[in-house]
Amino acid sequence: MTLILTRDRLQRDDHRFGWVMTLPGLLALSLIVLFPLLFTIFTSLFDYTLLHRRHDTFIGLENYREAIFANYFAESLWVTVKFVTAVVILEFLLGFTVALMLNNITRFKDIYYLILLMPLLINPVVVALIWRMFLHPELGIVNYLLSLVGIGPVNWLGDVRIAFWTVVLVDIWHQVSFMIVLLLAGLSALPREPYEAARMDGASTLQAFVHITLPLMRPVIMVTLLIRLIFAVKTFDLVFIMTRGGPGTSTDLISYFIYRSAFFGLNIGQASAISVLLLVIVLVLTAYLYRYMRSLA
Amino acid sequence: MKRLLLAAGLSLTLGSASAQAQTIHILMETVPDTRYIQDLLPEFKAATGIDVEMEAISYIDMHSKLVPQLSSPSGSYDAIVVDFYWVAEFTQAGWLMPLDDLIKKDGLDTSVYLPALMNLVGQVDGTTYMLPFYNYSMGIIYRKDLLNDPKAQAEFKAKYGADLALPQTWEDYARQVEFFSRDENGDGKPDFYGTVNQGQRGDCICMQWSNYLYGQGGKYRDENWKATFNDEAGVKAVEAYRNDIAKHGPTGAESFCFDEAANVFGQGKAYSFVTFNILLAGFNDPASSQVVGNADITSNPGGGLNGGWGWAIPNSSPNKEAAWTFLKWVESKDVVKKRTLAGGAPTQAWVFDDPEVVAKRPEMPRLKDLVATAQEFPTFTYTVEFVEVLGRELNLAVTGQKDAKEALDLAAAEFDKLTQKAGLQK
């Protein structure tokens, strides 16, 4: 009886200690995440502009209605969907291939690592500025190198059909290492035994990949895709510096749309409304993807 | 008691702070005129003991950095520079401090400024909010060695039956652009360009296209602030712009801003460039140009876009007094002259005619004329938003995704909506 009581008290103490230890973190989080989130939702219901910074005109869902029917809002959303799909899929395929290759290498692994990590260490604004220079159709190095093998000047950022893919390519250059690093960490943590057993049973490399690597890697792949997806939705710097959403509206990502309504249109209420919409979309997408991946496991 | 102690403590710290060296913070754009002033700052420090910290950033970041600072009760910038198309927005919002009392108190003479610039970046409805800082009125920068080449002149005369001389009409200029576009390797695309466009979506294309509009005799609005730029002249201007990019300019000009376009001209690959007058100094600087001594500027026959920046003190300025001391110094005759001699773009009339300045920079009288004939871009509370709308529609039209008339009609409809929202249309 006394023993049980003591255990109960110990547990309670543990519990309390846990709260005390996490409280500062929770407070900080609610201050920098929860408060801005609630403030944004609140602001999205008011006629709140930078010229009139007061929450005194409640307009309900008017900001949402206006945003949805604004010129080019649907286009911007569609460009964002295309962009996110393209970069997540392409970076995953490329990243997984490179990670598999690196996983089998023992010599100079650190050096490969270092080289691959470099783009990731560069600030996105700098990445965009550098590539804008490289891709100058007349004076940039990319078209110069292409001209050496007889390929005419490519209009990287000015051609409606090409500009979108140019931005995707630059994003891949910048972000693919993120996939590689996460997937490689997952690969190197896989147990050796299943592979040895499979080899004894005469399984081919492809069979081992499909039946052992993929199922074991599923949780890591899921997390990697989710994080990358959320980051990709937020992409801003690349289009802001490289294209300003152009030519026309072909690279007009939703984050730049929000930026414009906040800082050019001065309409913080509307910018908040679109941000909330975007948050809902990302949440739904994430939940769906999470459940889908879980159902596969 | 507690409050008394606090007040005593505060006055103590404040007192000691003002006795110490003061530092004022100013947000600037990375342009030549900023550099010239930075070079002169030690003189200001010696004269007043005030340190100046200039944060120079690129144009695209300025507006979004300024707005949150200005709209909060206490900002971190003591003085700022204001682009002409932010003026209405900033003054409407009540972010700028009226300077009239200070001007009167110190007997400052503001009649020294060119009227076109005082109207643009000085006064709003009779109140002085800014001292005009520099002008970037647009003109045609061209290669005078090519224009004055006797062989080219003879060929031009044979082809068009007219003299190759400085353009008197926009058609004259368009003919020269066509004439100088050369396909030397015969691949069907020019490899020497008659002109370079800065057609990137946003303010780049807006600013340059305005010159095409004025060149066709077009105007942005009528007296009642209703859009007129979607008329015949506007459509013609879009078509001419599209034609220049497609036939007479480098690949990718529809994605250039002025820096990319300037590089093409600076590398000696183009005859002309419709752009800001402040770029001329760079084309005659051996460090950044292959066409030193051959670049010159002339006025757009229909008048170029009038542009400029003004010095202002925001209401959120922590140290208005020191900021005013700086403004008086930086716009003093001595500093203005030194900055102009270094290559700057002044706003005070006398300096354009100063013999010493003209001896070093013979283009000065032409620059004065450029400013005097410059045309207005509509400035009102929502100019920044309008520039985004127009920039988008123009870029859609010149990249062939939209018909010129359709694009201009949509931009005009949004313009009318914005001017109504600003209470300008009656």
Image (tube, rainbow, N blue to C red):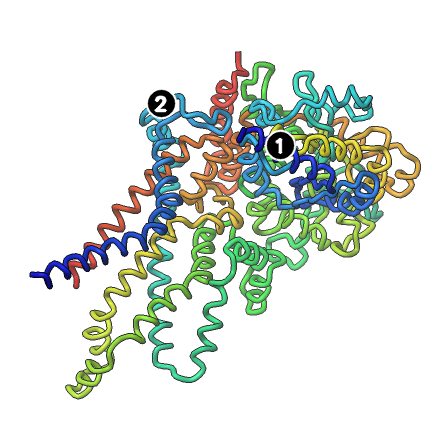
Whether residue B143 can be seen here = no
**Image-based side of B180 in relation to A57, left or right:** right
On screen, residue B287 above or below B7: below
Please identify the quarter of the rendering in which residue B289 is found: bottom right
**Mark 2 nearby-residue class (10 Å; few <14, some 14–19, many ≥20):** some
Q: Are marks 2 and 1 in contact (CB under 8 Å)?
A: no
Q: Of A230 and B198, which appears nearest the observer?
A: A230
Which residue matches tag 2?
Answer: A58
**Image-based side of A193 in relation to A240, left or right:** left
**Chain ID for label 1?**
B
Outermost top residue: B426
Residue B155 x, y percent position in the rendering = 78, 46
Residue A60 x, y percent position in the rendering = 32, 25
Residue A181 x, y percent position in the rendering = 38, 68
Q: Amino acid at mark 2?
A: Phe
**Image-based side of B48 in relation to A45, left or right:** right
Q: Of A227 and B267, which appears nearest the observer?
A: A227
Which residue matches tag 1?
Answer: B8
**Mark 1 nearby-residue class (10 Å; few <14, some 14–19, many ≥20):** few
- The image quadrant where one finds the N terminus of chain B is top right
Q: Nearer the viewer, mark 2 or mark 1?
A: 1
Residue at 77% x, 26% y: name it: B372
Residue at 25% x, 46% y: name it: A284
On screen, residue B91 above or below B203: above
Please identify the quarter of the rendering in which residue B387 is found: top right
Residue B34 x, y percent position in the rendering = 72, 43
Residue at 32% x, 43% y: name it: A279
Q: Which mark is residue A216?
A: none
Q: Amino acid at mark 1?
A: Ala
Residue at 33% x, 59% y: name it: A89
